Amino acid sequence: MNSSELWHRYCQHHYTSEKLGLSLDISRMNFDDGFFNITASAIARAFCQMDELEQGAVANPDEKRMVGHYWLRQPSLAPDPGISKEIHNCVVRIKNFAADIHSGGIAPPSGGKFKNLLLIGVGGSALGPQFIDDALRHHNAPMKLYFCDNTDPDGFDQAITQIGSELPHTLVAVISKSGGTKETRNGMLEAMHAYEAAGLEFSKHAILTTGVESPLEQMAKEQKWLAIFPMWDWVGGRTSQMSAVGLLPAALQGIDIDELLAGAAAMDTATREHDVRKNPAALMALMWYDAAKNRGLRCMAVIPYKDRLVYLSRYLQQLVMESLGKELDLSGNTVHEGLTVYGNKGSSDQHAYVQQLREGHHDFFVTLIEVLNDRDGESIEVEPNVTSGDYLLGFLLGTRDALYQKNRESMTVTVNEVTPRSVGALIALFERTVGLFASLVNINAYHQPGVEAGKRAAGEVIALQEKIVKILSDNRNREMTAEQIAAVAGLPERVEWTYILLRHWVANGRFGVKQASDGSPETASFLAVKD
């Protein structure tokens, strides 16, 4: 297209909402003129399914539960008045608790105020809070946030070392719906050990967000933790940012959670619109559908041109990939559906993988995120009449144009500024887009059998570990190969796991295991030399 035709297409396919402070440009996506007519019935069905979801339909067949993250920012929509009341009361409790922490009404036993928050969670219990922390953290925030979001011993040590002498003034937030998530359980036990080693009473520093009547809730009550907040079974981890999972750490950081909720609620209202042209989530979902189904573009590069939004791609990885990565569709057909998300930030990506995006394998489309406001206050000129923010916009437009020249597709989401309201709106926009896209491709976005399979496999590894330890103990000082040990365990098919476990124990001095002879995995021998 020539410049005049591109300008016309831009004007024709540009969504803008002054109320939301957001616009969406889909003009550089390669849909044709008849696309919206062809997909009219499909998106109409998606709208109806989304309406049913918000009205309380059972959407997670594995757990037989509703999916109600939309109610979190508009409790009056919940199908049960009791749920509405619970949501409202939880938000009030969060704000009151944060106020008590900030004022010193709830204080550490050593005196003074809590200065830090150590958040222990995994997946949606950490990615949302990390995104919000990086996007909205203020330089004079009342609390500094640290994370333990894995079961990596070195990661625990790093977090505790960073906190250092301020451990007595550090609040610990443990987040786990079931109470049985091993990464979170391990992080909690590591934190308990660190506090005990420092002569501190962990329960006087601990708060919990968990499912009602979970084993973890019972433990926290018995140990008299400072506070317990609910995780409802109708809120999935990847859509939990507007629950206590995300609102509690945000409030403790001094972020206006009312504005977060208001931004999400405003976007929800806009994306309930059944007129596609007036619904940014429907437009995005249709662009995903057209790119993936018609052109096989199964990857989405998310590039925000704002440092504060660098964690957006990580947050969207779970939201999009866990929701959409499904083997079977709702009819039981094998479809291997999914959309791979990756990204960093602009203009850094222009020095990283934009080269491949422009000239390499074409299996992707790009979502560019633009923020109109450069900074609080005026900018200096780095050249006559040119600021660093002018360059940032230039890089964005340059990337968009460079991609178009090679027939590489992109869309651009623009927000006025990075605020609690705009971030809340962005979260809600992508949540709704995921739901609508799932309907378009006939999959269930609200269960995750693949994740559960991985957890079960991890449990099998730990069970095997117990068997191997006993075998080595019963055969002390006897050299054995991995194959021999696996055979004695009655699990010859797990010889590879056996070798990898043995190698790990040798490296970490576990169970007195030594490698008796060098060699390949097939010939290396091991033995236990002490209890």
Image (tube, rainbow, N blue to C red):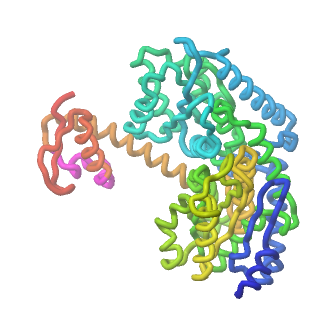
Please say if 338 is above or below 37.
Answer: above
Question: Given the current orientation, which residue lies at the most extreme front position?
Answer: 384
Please say if 282 is above or below 163.
Answer: below
- Residue at screen point 66% across, 54% down: 374
The quadrant in which the N terminus is found is bottom right
State the image quarter where residue 159 is shown: top left
Please say if 74 is above or below 392.
Answer: above
Q: Is 463 within the magenta? A: no
- Residue at screen point 71% across, 87% down: 2
Residue 178 visible in image: no
Of residue 154 and residue 305, the one placed in the foreground of this image is 305
Question: Given the current orientation, which residue lies at the most extreme bottom position?
Answer: 2
State the image quarter where residue 68 is shown: top right
Range of residues picked out in magenta: 480-496
26 relative position to 223: left or right: right
Q: How far across and down, in percent of the image, does residue 529 sit?
A: 15, 33
State the image quarter where residue 501 is shown: top left
Q: How far across and down, in percent of the image, does residue 462 sit?
A: 38, 40
Q: How far across and down, in percent of the image, does residue 416 sit?
A: 74, 55
Magenta: main secondary structure equals helix
- Residue at screen point 70% across, 23% down: 97
Q: Is 485 within the magenta? A: yes
Of residue 312 and residue 35, the one placed in the foreground of this image is 312
249 relative position to 46: left or right: left
Residue 444 visible in image: yes
The quadrant in which the C terminus is found is top left
Q: How far across and down, in percent of the image, does residue 55 sit?
A: 84, 49
Please say if 296 is above or below 306.
Answer: below
Question: Given the current orientation, which residue lies at the most extreme top position?
Answer: 110
All told, the count of numbered labels is 0
218 relative position to 283: left or right: left
